[in-house]
Amino acid sequence: MQASRLAELVVAGMGDGGRTKALASSLRSLIVDGRLLDGDRLPAERVLAEALQMSRSTVTAAYDQLRVEGILVGRQGAGTFVSVPAIEGGRPDEDPRLGEAAHFDLSVAVLPAPSLLAAAVSAAAESIVVHLASIGLQPAGLPELRTLVASEYSRRGLPTTPDQILITSGALHGWDLLLRAFARPGAPVVTEQPTYPGVIDAALAHRVRLRPLPVDADGWHPEELDPARTPVLAHVTFDGQNPTGLWADRSTRNRVLSTFDSSTLVAVDETIIDFPSSPTVGAETSPLAHNSTVVILGSASKSFWAGLRVGWLRGPASMIRRLAALRAGQDLAPPILNQLVVAELLRRREEILPDRRDAIAGRRRALLDAIEQYCPNWTVVPPAGGLAAWIDLGGRSSTQLAIEAREHGIRVTPGTRFSQTGTHDGFLRLPYVLPIEHLEESVRRLAAASEKLPSARPRHHPNAATAWSA
């Protein structure tokens, strides 16, 4: 990271007290929150001192303090580097105490099935008759469903033909196919940090070298990617980013996409695109028609029902043929009946989605109101869309809170599960998919659990000035 950019982040995160202590605390927060990564080289003490307009002795003392703590190391003739303690397996597993049954489960951000699902299943069962004479295996997916998905993209202003659509077993399956096709072990792959844990897990299963695209209350920070390491693949979510709830405007999308050249295949995940916080937010869609290095991942899981396990991938026809052949080693082809159900749901989307959006809007407001009432020391990145809010716990540990919350009948996922290296322990994702009364009671119980934790560490988050106070 350039000294000028690091200085901006450091100054924003410095609190009261002595300058050495404040500087060390701010640098520590950047490491804990994943803005400075294991192996990153820090600017020389003299260079950072000039950027901060501090004395060199102050920077040296702060570096020395962090070296004693073991999170910075000096290498003779090379400089000072971040050294995050190694985690067995590459990233933290959930504490076994988090797996017990809970009265309220806030660990998943999915909705139950809509009331029209039963009717869609009945219609699909009738229409499957015409397929029974075939073997039922179509690796690229049912032509009927591919046509419907392609038509939806064309309606949005992105002309698409059915041969550009691959039906998958969910968006995560599409991401896994891209990793199988384009990323060899050791290849550099970019994912947002924080991001959906399944995106990270799938990449690690292919033994790639993950590099984070930082995302925080200010948005996406592609300028912090290492220009010397061109990734073969990148995964981004512009519409209701999971877990932050951010929604990128057009200029942000273009800025992020322009960071990658033609040698990088960018997978834009639109799994949560049907849940903007307002029509104005939802008007911003991915400007992808001009960029052949971009593919789109979509899914019926969030919009309709996760139990269907049906998604899709939009890309060049030649790539679709390649991926359809590649999936033979996984699941051969998607289930015909499930695809017919999703086809029925897509035809009736305008009957289904308005009610689901209204329900989510009310639950979002109820969650934020409950946080304001019971947890006034927490701050929230404004959820411009999606199904969850990203909470800054004000210095408390989300891992400790998740364990204590079990005693109060609540299951939550610690922020560390959403990072590549176990950072973001000071954050918590809270979905707003449960009924309003359950959300209110859950937050009340989380507040009680939080009171049982050790006093919060003084923590000055670099984006505190832009976070929305709940």
Image (cartoon, helix red, strand yellow):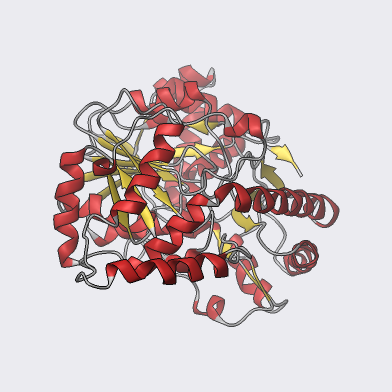
Residue 194 in the image, given as x and y percentages of width and height = 47, 47
- Is the N terminus in the top left, top right, bottom left or bottom right quadrant? top left
Residue 376 in the image, given as x and y percentages of width and height = 81, 50
Q: Residue at x 45, y 50 (%)?
A: 68
Task: State whether residue 122 is above or below residue 211.
Answer: below
Residue 46 in the image, given as x and y percentages of width and height = 41, 22
Task: State whether residue 64 is above or below residue 402.
Answer: above
- Is the C terminus in the top left, top right, bottom left or bottom right quadrant? top right
Q: Is residue 354 visible?
A: yes
Q: Residue at x 58, y 34 (%)?
A: 282
Which of 127 and 177 lies nearest the eye of the viewer?
127
Which of 97 and 244 lies nearest the eye of the viewer?
244
Residue 357 in the image, given as x and y percentages of width and height = 66, 48
Which of 236 and 326 lies nearest the eye of the viewer?
326
In screen coordinates, is 188 left or right of 45? left
Task: State whether residue 282 is above or below residue 333.
Answer: above
Which of 94 and 300 lies nearest the eye of the viewer?
300
**Figure label count:** 0
Q: Is residue 186 visible?
A: no
Please identify the residue farthest to the right as the structure is shown: 373
Q: Residue at x 47, y 52 (%)?
A: 69
Task: State whether residue 57 is above or below residue 328.
Answer: above
Q: Quadrant of residue 169?
A: bottom left
Q: Quadrant of residue 180?
A: bottom left
Q: Residue at x 49, y 79 (%)?
A: 96
